[in-house]
Amino acid sequence: ATAQTLTKGKGRRVVVVGGGYGGTIAAKYIRMFDKSIEVVLIEPNKQFVSCPFSNLYIGGMLPDLSSLTIGYDKLAANHGITMVYDTVTAVDAAKKTVTVSSGTIDYDRLVLSPGVDFRAEELEGYDLASTPLVMPHAWKAGAQTMLLRKQLVDMPDGGTVVITVPLAPFRCPPGPYERASMIAMYLKQHKPKSKLVMLDANPDIVSKAGLFRKGWKKHYEGIIQYRGAQKVTAVNAKNRSVFIEGMEEVKGDVVNVIPPQRAGNIARVAGLIGPDKSWCPIDGTTFESTIQKSIHVIGDACVAGAMPKSGYSANSEAKTCAANIV
C-alpha cells in the first residue's frame, strides 16, 4: 500500500513502524486480540534478516543467511495487516500522522519499534557511510554480516581479529561475546596461528561472564585475549587500527568495530528521547512514551527497566504493548 491509498475510515487504526522482533509481533497480536482494529506496518525492507543466530553464520556454522531471512507476506495475509514498504521521515504527534515518501498516514495509536542507530560521533575518524565497509560492525544483520564473514575467510593464517565492544547498554548484551566464541571456533579449526583481541569498554563481560570465561578457558585458551575497561575512542579505517582512549593503537587484519548505540533515528525525530540523550523513556505497563501521548516505543529503542535490549525482550514487550493498546 501507499499513503495515498490509506484514507482512514471511522474505525480505529494502529500504525506500527519497524518490522523486526518487536514491530511484527505488536502488529500480529493487536490483530489477534481485536480484528476490528486496522493495523498498518511500515518497514523499508521487503525482507527481515535476523540478528539473533547471525553469529552462527560468521563462525561458519550456517552456509548462508537464507534461514535467517524472512518475508512479510504470510504475516500480512494471515493476520490482515496492511504493509507499507517505506521509511518514516516525520511524526506529528498533535495531528497523529506519520510521513512517508508517498504522503502521510493517520493513526489513533502509534507503535515505534525502530531498533538501534549508532553514535558514530563518539568515535573519532568513524564515518557511518564508509568505515563499516572496511571495519564492519555487523550489528544490523545482512550485508555487514556477509562482509565480516568474507574478511575472516580471506584473512591469512596468523592474522589478528579485533572486536571492540561499546559501553552498555547496547543491542544484545551477550552478542559480542557470542561472536568472539564463534570466531575463535572458526580460527581454531581453520587458522590455528591466528588470535582474537577483544577490547571491551565495559570493566568486565556484560552478560553471562562466568559462562563465557569458563568456555573460553576450556576451548579457546591462547586464542581469545580479553581486555576489559579498554574504551575505543578513535579509529583509522585505512590502517585497520583502533585507538584506546586516544593513546594505545591496536591493529588488526579483521577489525569488527561495534559502535556505541542509541534508539533508531525516527525516535529522535519524533522527540521521544529521554534525558540520557540515547533511549526512549516509557510507562513500564503500556510502553506508552512518557514524553508523547498515544505513541508507544518497544524493543531496543526503549528503556524497559532491567530488560535487556534483545529480540526476546522485544517480542515480550510487543505482546504486553498490544494487549494494553487493545
Image (cartoon, helix red, strand yellow):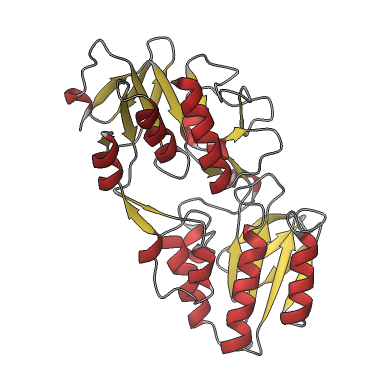
Q: In x, y percent, where is residue 301?
A: 56, 36
Q: Is residue 194 visible?
A: yes
Determine whether, in the image, residue 290 is placed left or right of residue 201: left
Q: From the viewer's side, name the closer residue of 80 and 314.
A: 80
Q: Is residue 85 visible?
A: no
Q: Is residue 50 positioned above or below 162 on the image?
A: above
Which residue is drawn at the image coordinates 59% and 43% (left, top)? 119
Q: Does residue 89 lie above or below 226 as drawn?
A: above
Residue at coordinates 65% horizontally, 69% vertically from top-left? 180
Please tell me which residue is depicted at 52% across the width and 57% down the height of the picture: 52
Task: Name which quarter of the figure residue 13 lies in.
Answer: top left
Kindly identify the residue that appears in the image at 60 percent across and 18 percent down: 290
Quarter holding the C terminus is top left
On the image, the x and y values in percent for residue 235 come to 63, 59
Which quadrant of the structure image shows residue 95?
A: top left
Comparing 84 with 36, the one in front is 36
Viewport quadrant of the N terminus: top left
Left/right of residue 173 with respect to residue 90 in the rendered view: right
Residue 193: percent from the left, percent from the top? 66, 90
Residue 254 falls left or right of residue 213: left
Q: How many marks?
A: 0
- In the rendered image, residue 232, in percent from the top left (x then y), is placed at 71, 56
